[in-house]
Each structure stands twice: as structure tokens, then as C-alpha cells.
Amino acid sequence: MRRCLLGASLAGGVLLLASCGPSRETGRNTAETKESIYLRGHQLYVTMRMEEAEHELMRAAAMDSSYRDPLVDLGSLWFDLGMKEEGPRRTERFRKARVFLVRAEELGYREAAAYDMLCEVCTGLDDAQGFLRYAKRNAERFPYDRQFYNLGVAHFGVEDWAGVVKSQREASDRFKESPYAGAYFRQMGRAYMKMGRDQTAERTFTAGVQAVDAIMAGMKKSGGGTGSEGYRRLQDDKIGMLLLLKRLHITYREAEKLADVERRLREAGYTK
């Protein structure tokens, strides 16, 4: 009897094993299983044969409503297609992606990649509450600097100013050297402005600029990183905070502070 070979591939963090095909010696077809159909659909997906992949993945999913793997691939497939579109076509694809990703999450698929896609999908569908829901779950399961930044953005989207301040203060305490450090202070300050607490906002922006300056100085001293994405992010957030300080100084007619912030903007390379 022919010895079957097992093939392995990775999709959405799920390891898959190929089932055996027809036996050449007997000429009989091995009965198809949900796993064999899924694997065929998965291979079609990774080779970008999307229409055929969807057909096979839907077949696998229909065989067992609790079978998670094809749902993960179907969600990822529609997400990928949506990211290539604009307008109503993106909306349609994102809606399909959300159906499958939500079901996969309910069945225990709780990887960072899934929450990233769900956050992106909810944002694309103008579902601010959904974005906040999945941003919270992402930050709880994967408490890293980027997840906390997204959590602040999500709180801002539902106008939960206290939630913005709480999440970004925690983040600024936990990730003092992060490229997102400036963003934490920037979001906190903006939330304070929304609450009418302009003096607290001013102190927050000032502290944020100082924190960013210290991080950037350390990156320069170490001899690297000044051209990195993280360095550019810090620079952008510094300029953003200086512009918000400028707005506050204009509002309250603080000429000396305004002159200082304009000088610092020029030094930061802002010329508009």
C-alpha cells in the first residue's frame, strides 16, 4: 500500500495537516473529510485563487458548525479582498469578514491578528462600539504598546474621554520608551481639552514633549534609529502636541508661550 505523506501549512496561526488523496493501487477515492476539504480550500487561498477557495472553505464549514479553521480563513479572505477595494465594495467585503471572524472568535480563535482585523473591519464599517470592544480584548490578551495606543483611539471614537485618559495614562507608565509614548500623551491631552480642562491639557502636552525629546535623544545617542518608523512617529506626535499647545496659547493670548512653541516647531522642522 502506498504510504501517505503529510503536508503542513500555517494560516491564521492554525497548523494544518493534509489528508491522503486517492490510492493509486486501488483506484478508490478516500472519503472526503472536513479537514481534507478545508486543506484544499486553504491551499487555494494561499495561492490567491479566492473564488475557488471560498467554495471549498464554505463546504468545510458547512460540514461542522463548530469547525473553526475554515471560518478563520474565510474571515481573512474577505478581509484581504476588502482591503483592496474602496467604497461600497469594501463595505460589503468587510461585513462578510466580520461575520466569519466574530464566529471564529466565539469558538476560541483569539489571536492578535484576528483582533487587528476585527478592529480594522469595525473602523471601516463605522462601528465605533465594535472597535472599542475588540480593542479592549486585544489589549487584555496582548498588553503591548500598540494595542494600548489603539485602545486609546477606540475610546476617543466613542467620546469616552475618561476612558482615553485612563488607558493612555496606564500606557505611558508601562511603556516609557515606546515609539507610541508621544501618542499616549497626545491622546490624553486631547481628551482633557474635550472635557474643558485646558490647563491639565497644557501640562500633559508639555510633559509629553519632554518625554519624546528624552526618547529621541536616547535614540540619537545610541547611534541608530533616527531614520526608523518609530523615530518618525515620535517626531510626528511631538509636532502634533506643539500645535495643540499653540492653539491653547492663542486661545488664552499667552504671547511668551506662543513665541516659545513657534520656535520649537521650527526647530522640529515644521514650516507650515
Image (spheres, rainbow, N blue to C red):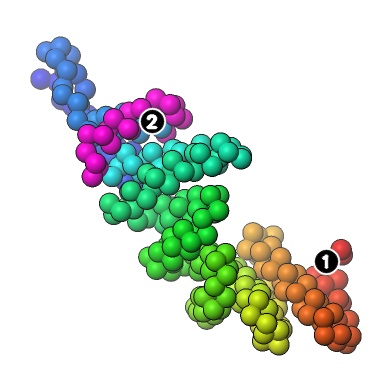
- Please tell me whether mark 2 sits on a helix, a strand or a loop: helix
Left or right of 204 on screen, residue 149: left
Dot 2 crowding, Cα within 10 Å, few <14, some 14–19, many 20+? many
Q: Is residue 63 magenta?
A: yes
Q: Which residue corresponds to the image point at 15% horizontal and 12% vertical from the top-left?
A: 27
Question: Residue 160 appears in which quarter of the rendering?
Answer: bottom right
* The one of 110 and 58 positioned closer to us in this rendering: 58
Magenta segment's dominant SS is helix
Does residue 130 lie above or below 193 as drawn?
Answer: above
Does residue 272 lie above or below 215 as drawn?
Answer: above
- Please tell me whether mark 1 sits on a helix, a strand or a loop: loop
* The one of 212 and 3 positioned closer to us in this rendering: 212
Q: Magenta segment range? A: 46-67
Res. 221 in view: no
Which of the two discs, 1 and 2, labels the residue nearer the N terminus?
2
Provide the residue designation for mark 2: 54
Res. 199 in view: yes
Left or right of 33 on screen, residue 138: right
Q: Is residue 254 magenta?
A: no
Residue 171: x and y in percent read 52, 75
Q: Which residue corresponds to the image point at 40% horizontal and 64% vertical from the top-left?
A: 137
Q: Amino acid at mark 2?
A: Glu
Q: Quadrant of the C terminus?
A: bottom right
Q: Disc 1 or disc 2, which is closer to the eye?
A: 2
Q: Which residue corresponds to the image point at 34% horizontal and 53% vertical from the top-left?
A: 105
Left or right of 186 on screen, residue 120: left
Dot 1 crowding, Cα within 10 Å, few <14, some 14–19, many 20+? some
Provide the residue designation for mark 1: 270
Residue 72: x and y in percent read 36, 44
